[in-house]
């Protein structure tokens, strides 16, 4: 297991609604999978729905890769309409 790191997590739109906040700092393993697991456990079904269809912005790159390493900041993005 990797050491935990402090990660600033920013929430947008439906993700912010599910979390009940716009931002927080979490001590987690530095992977996208670990972040998703912690958020689903912490915020339940509403956040799980966002995570199933949304994505994470890590180091300026939108990702759904569970093995993606994360560092100090991650944005949780709901799906966007249009295109």
Image: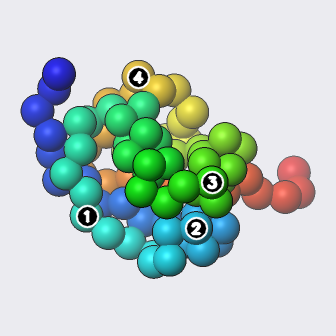
Residue 60 in view, yes or no? no
Disc with the residue nearer the chain's start (3 vs 1): 1
> Could you say which quadrant of the image residue 53 lies in?
top right
Q: Are marks 3 and 1 in contact (CB under 8 Å)?
A: no
User: Which residue in the protein does label 3 denote?
Assistant: 45
Q: Residue at x 54, y 55 (%)?
A: 44
Mark whose residue sits in front, 3 or 1: 3
Name the mark nearer the viewer: 3 or 4. Answer: 3
Mark 1 element type: strand
Residue beneath disc 2:
18
Whole-percent x, y for residue 28 in the image: 23, 44
Q: Is label 4 in contact with label 2 (beta carbons under 8 Å)?
A: no
Nearer the camera: disc 4 or disc 2: 2
Task: Confirm or deny contact between disc 2 and disc 1 (CB under 8 A).
Answer: no
Residue that sits furthest to the right in the current view: 82
Residue 13, by quadrant, is bottom right
Q: CA distance from mark 2 to mark 3?
A: 9 Å
Q: Which disc number belongs to residue 67?
A: 4
Q: Secondary structure at mark 4?
A: loop
């Amino acid at each position: 297991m990797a050491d935990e790191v402090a990660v600033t997590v920013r929430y947008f739109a439906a993700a912010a609604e599910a979390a009940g906040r716009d931002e927080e700092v979490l001590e987690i393993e530095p992977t996208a999978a670990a972040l998703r697991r912690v958020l689903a456990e912490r915020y339940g079904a509403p956040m799980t729905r966002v995570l199933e269809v949304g994505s994470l912005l890590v180091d300026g790159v939108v990702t759904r890769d569970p093995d993606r390493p994360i560092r100090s900041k991650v944005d949780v993005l709901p799906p966007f309409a249009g295109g």
